[in-house]
Amino acid sequence: MMDVKQYLLKKKKVIDEALDCFLPQPDVYPCSIHQAMRYSVMGTGKRFRPILTVATFELLGGEGDGDILRAACALELIHTYSLIHDDLPCMDDDAWRRGKPTLHKAFDESIAVLAGDALSALAFELLASTGRSDIIHEVAKAIGAQGMVGGQVVDIETEGKPFSSKDVEYIHSQKTGALITVAARIGAILAGAGIQELTSVTRFGKDLGLAFQIVDDILNLEGETDTLGKSTGTDEKKKKATYPALFGLEHSRLEAQRFIEKAKKELDMLGTSAYILKALADFVIQRTR
Amino acid sequence: MMDVKQYLLKKKKVIDEALDCFLPQPDVYPCSIHQAMRYSVMGTGKRFRPILTVATFELLGGEGDGDILRAACALELIHTYSLIHDDLPCMDDDAWRRGKPTLHKAFDESIAVLAGDALSALAFELLASTGRSDIIHEVAKAIGAQGMVGGQVVDIETEGKPFSSKDVEYIHSQKTGALITVAARIGAILAGAGIQELTSVTRFGKDLGLAFQIVDDILNLEGETDTLGKSTGTDEKKKKATYPALFGLEHSRLEAQRFIEKAKKELDMLGTSAYILKALADFVIQRTR
């Protein structure tokens, strides 16, 4: 059995190198947009989504690393674009992200909007270069008005208003869960997974995504800005619809743990080699950033 | 010979109906984002880009209307998303568009950012449903940091500063020209065009795109807000890098006409049936909105 920590570090390095290669160089005209894209993408990101894609691909016997790396990096670009737009003054108005000032603070607001747009376009360019329109369809659907963007809409609209567990579940499953689920699915699809494997991986991704966002909520409440690399206490201040706000910290922790256990159970049919994905699930609950 | 005006009206109707069909219904949860998407897309748009795609497709013998309509509508969604983001307070800060208040005025700024993002995602979903990753690659490249977004970056950055004809050409060819060129190319590609036809159509699209933006600049300077459906005089006020600002109105008019004649000449090799595309080019120079 491979050392999981070593595996994740190795994959992170591969992803970081690939991102560096796929992003336009900072001295290419118009320079400011390329510098802004690099500012937000490169650095301290955990690369959780692309590692999930690559690990799922490898678990299911996928071979070669061209298409899978392009698809995995596309998801990291989309994740970064969503963070940039979510941080804007008209949205969450956040000043700190990935251990440094948010893009609209470091550059300006117009470049932040445009860098988000450009990262999204580059993501689809990378996805298209795999030649697989089926995975492009999956990603586009997952990040649209009834996916990631829809989750962000409800997140913004419930701010400061009474909300139900249904609202929180919608926000979590769409804003965060949709992209994490599709990250796992794309790894499986590119590995040529069968329908049963794909179903397991999809269920795994959904539970993992929910747990990921519950932990995000918990860390916003009791994490350290220095470790986390972004502002804390902001959800409470803005009266955001979160798990802890609805159920309290203790119950939220238990729920996150329950989703992780459920996620790992979904992988049982994939045999013992699923241990890396299971370790990735455990990382979600243990993470401090 | 078909009556060109009738042809364009008929195609506009088909595009409008297809857009209505592709956009989520306004009562689908989360309703606000779907209402915002429809607010900006439906209504008085000229549908210039999708009509260009369909007309090029038909000129080159393309048959069937499923894929071509999806691709054509995707381009209209992308065009609309770019207008929404360009109109934001941190960008051009425009209050009026397509004969009504801009989206961030009618709804709010956060919904405007998110509706733009959602329209972009829906565009790629439609493109992906054609199963043609080659056209997705073309579109993604055309609208990215070295295409449409790059043009908007330079447009914003040159505002109020000295600029050269090189700046204006870059802005025009990227901000407007890139999407118009790709609109023509996609029609040709989906029709199964050969390399020579594709080269002609590409050159046609480039010249057409330049002329289109020069006319846009002229209309901003001397058009009527009521007819145009958007604010006028804004470029001069903001000291934007435009053709008239650099060369004066008269020379700009001549340049637009020159690009249109050049564009039409590119179509000569395609025979007499190119008359509809040539009429579309004439429309660009004659338009009042």
Image (cartoon, coloured by chain):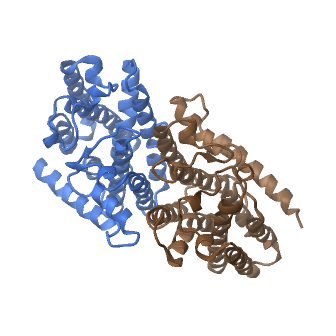
Chain colours: A blue, B brown
Q: Going by the image, does B175 lie left or right of B7? A: left
Q: Residue at x 76, y 62 (%)?
A: B287
- The location of residue A150, given as percent across then percent down, is 46, 35
Q: Is residue A183 visible?
A: yes
Q: Residue at x 25, y 47 (%)?
A: A48
Q: Going by the image, does B9 lie left or right of B148? A: right
Q: Is residue A179 above or below residue B64?
A: above
Q: Is residue A1 visible?
A: no
In this rendered view, identify the residue nearer to me: A278 or B261: B261
In this rendered view, identify the residue nearer to me: A54 or A172: A172
Identify the image quadrant of residue B103.
Answer: top right
Q: Is residue A197 above or below residue B196?
A: above
Q: Residue at x 65, y 81 (%)?
A: B196
- The location of residue B146, given as percent across then percent down, is 45, 68
The number of callouts visible is: 0
In the picture, the quarter occupied by the C terminus of chain A is: top left
- The location of residue A69, given as percent across then percent down, is 31, 59
Q: Residue at x 39, y 19 (%)?
A: A163
In this rendered view, identify the residue nearer to me: B255 or A115: B255
Q: Going by the image, does A187 lie left or right of B124? A: left
Q: Is residue B266 above or below residue A114?
A: below
- The location of residue B130, given as percent across then percent down, is 58, 54
Farthest front residue in view:
B237
Q: Going by the image, does B206 lie left or right of A33? A: right
